[in-house]
Image (spheres, rainbow, N blue to C red):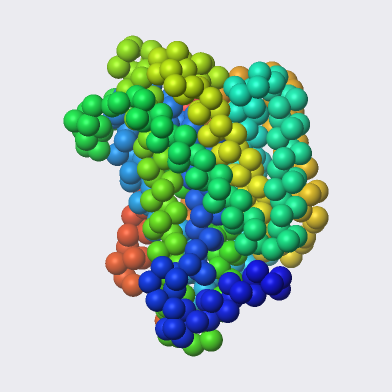
């Protein structure tokens, strides 16, 4: 344990003993949810939120709100599993399911990891293109170097990596706060966006994409790994207190992510939809260009900075999640940098082939939504098992609520599949 991490551990023990209260008591436990929340503001969110706002105005704001509330529930369960069992979700799956089932779950999780990397790499490359005019493929190569550098911070302690990711999130928040101020949306129109409703199958397609971009399968696996060894509760009461602290972490981090996502859609609705520019959201380079034209104030550069920060941070988090998945499901580990190289290869190939980057971003988010049930249903199943979870076992209401969330996600995916095929 590095000196900085030792100090954090000692502070956590003081918090559990009741000697640190208020913000000082919570601080040692902050971090895991912020790392997970990066996946909730990744470049896929930029694509789906901008497309949704430009095409349908404020209509899908309620979808973002519901998806974020779902994310809070899901991430709290994932954190709770790690605290209660000392294992992450893939490890529990390996112990409780057959080897064949574990291998199948691992394969689908790896496919989802590649879809995740596709969105993150393309997003960061587009961000570099917006800021410096670098063509997409060289920008993607620069992104890969930067992602390796961020991952190297883990060797100096996970707390440093958490700090860097928190800075990236801060950059994204400031950038979108400035753009919302410049866009000056009508508050009454924004409020109407929280009334549930759809306008045709295309709005449902985008809603599922928003869901896939918000509730990310790989961080359902990752969050349990971030809490399993962070601070180990020696008694039932300590485990309860650790979980209460982690709930605060989840609510703060996910609340920030939700506000950022809503800001994206509000900006697109106010700037593009209200002026009849319904197709602008399909191309993020065009989005940045038009934001600069319509809003001034270097809004295009703010958008590019936010997109680059999102792509770099979420790409690193995706690599960590991939390592957790492989180690948990099949007891195999490969060097972190080799995993980074493997998962980024499909993204580099697609960019080199000249595929429409923004469209690939939206479709990758739809693909991600199909991976959610494979992580969510086992999580729900395990968290209701008292023999596994002990004092942190789900209450009946929590189990019922999570079952409703899983059902909604599966039904939306079935509808999307039917619309896509027919």
Q: Residue at x 66, y 47 (%)?
A: 316
* 370 vs 160: above or below: above
Image quadrant of residue 401? bottom left
Q: Nearer the viewer, residue 23 or 71?
A: 23
Q: Is residue 38 visible?
A: yes
In the shown orientation, is residue 392 left or right of residue 87? left
Q: Residue at x 74, y 65 (%)?
A: 331
Residue farthest front in this picture: 297
Q: How many marks?
A: 0
Image quadrant of residue 413? top left
**Quadrant of the frame with the C terminus:** top left
Q: Residue at x 54, y 76 (%)?
A: 11
Q: Is residue 103 visible?
A: no
Location of residue 368 in the rendering, given as x and y in whole percent from the top left corner: 54, 41
Location of residue 307 in the rendering, given as x and y in whole percent from the top left corner: 55, 33
Q: Nearer the viewer, residue 322 or 12?
A: 12
Q: Nearer the viewer, residue 220 or 304?
A: 304
In the shown orientation, is residue 139 left or right of residue 178? right
**Quadrant of the frame with the N terminus:** bottom right
* 48 vs 385: above or below: above
Location of residue 358 in the rendering, given as x and y in whole percent from the top left corner: 56, 24
Q: Residue at x 53, y 25 (%)?
A: 301
Location of residue 396 in the rendering, given as x and y in whole percent from the top left corner: 31, 70
In the shown orientation, is residue 294 left or right of residue 160? left
Residue farthest left in this picture: 188
């Amino acid at each position: 344990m590095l000196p900085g991490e030792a100090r954090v551990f000692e502070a956590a023990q003081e918090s559990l003993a009741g000697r640190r209260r208020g913000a000082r008591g919570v601080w040692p436990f902050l971090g895991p949810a912020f790392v997970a929340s990066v996946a909730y503001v990744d470049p896929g969110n930029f694509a789906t939120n901008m497309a949704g706002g430009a095409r349908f105005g404020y209509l899908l704001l309620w979808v973002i709100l519901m998806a974020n509330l779902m994310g809070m529930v899901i991430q709290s369960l994932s954190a709770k599993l790690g605290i209660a069992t000392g294992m992450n979700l893939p490890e529990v799956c390996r112990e409780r399911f057959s080897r064949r089932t574990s291998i199948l779950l691992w394969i689908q999780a790896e496919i989802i990891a590649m879809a995740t990397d596709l969105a993150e790499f393309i997003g960061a490359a587009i961000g570099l293109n917006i800021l410096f005019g670098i063509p997409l493929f060289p920008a993607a190569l620069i992104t890969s170097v930067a992602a390796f550098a961020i991952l190297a911070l883990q060797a100096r302690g996970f707390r440093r990596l958490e700090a860097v990711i928190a800075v990236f999130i801060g950059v994204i928040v400031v950038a979108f706060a400035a753009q919302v101020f410049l866009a000056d949306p009508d508050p009454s129109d924004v409020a109407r966006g929280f009334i549930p409703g759809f306008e045709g199958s295309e709005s449902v397609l985008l809603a599922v994409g928003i869901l896939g971009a918000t509730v990310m399968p790989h961080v359902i696996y990752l969050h349990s790994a971030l809490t399993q060894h962070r601070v180990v509760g020696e008694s039932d009461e300590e485990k309860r207190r650790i979980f209460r602290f982690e709930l605060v972490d989840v609510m703060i981090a996910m609340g920030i992510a939700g506000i950022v996502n809503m800001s994206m859609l509000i900006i697109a609705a106010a700037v593009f939809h209200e002026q009849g520019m319904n197709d602008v959201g399909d191309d993020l380079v065009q989005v940045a260009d038009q934001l600069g034209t319509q809003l001034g104030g270097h809004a295009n550069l703010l958008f590019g900075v936010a997109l680059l920060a999102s792509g770099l941070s979420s790409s690193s988090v995706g690599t960590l999640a991939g390592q957790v998945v492989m180690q948990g499901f099949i007891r195999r580990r490969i060097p972190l940098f080799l995993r980074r190289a493997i998962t980024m290869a499909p993204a580099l190939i697609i960019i080199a082939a000249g595929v429409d980057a923004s469209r690939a971003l939206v479709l990758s988010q739809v693909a991600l939504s199909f991976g959610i049930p494979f992580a969510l249903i086992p999580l729900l199943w395990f968290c209701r098992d008292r023999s596994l979870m002990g004092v942190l076992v789900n209450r009946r209401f929590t189990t019922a609520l999570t079952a409703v969330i899983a059902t909604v996600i599966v039904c939306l995916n079935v509808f999307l599949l039917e619309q896509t095929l027919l």
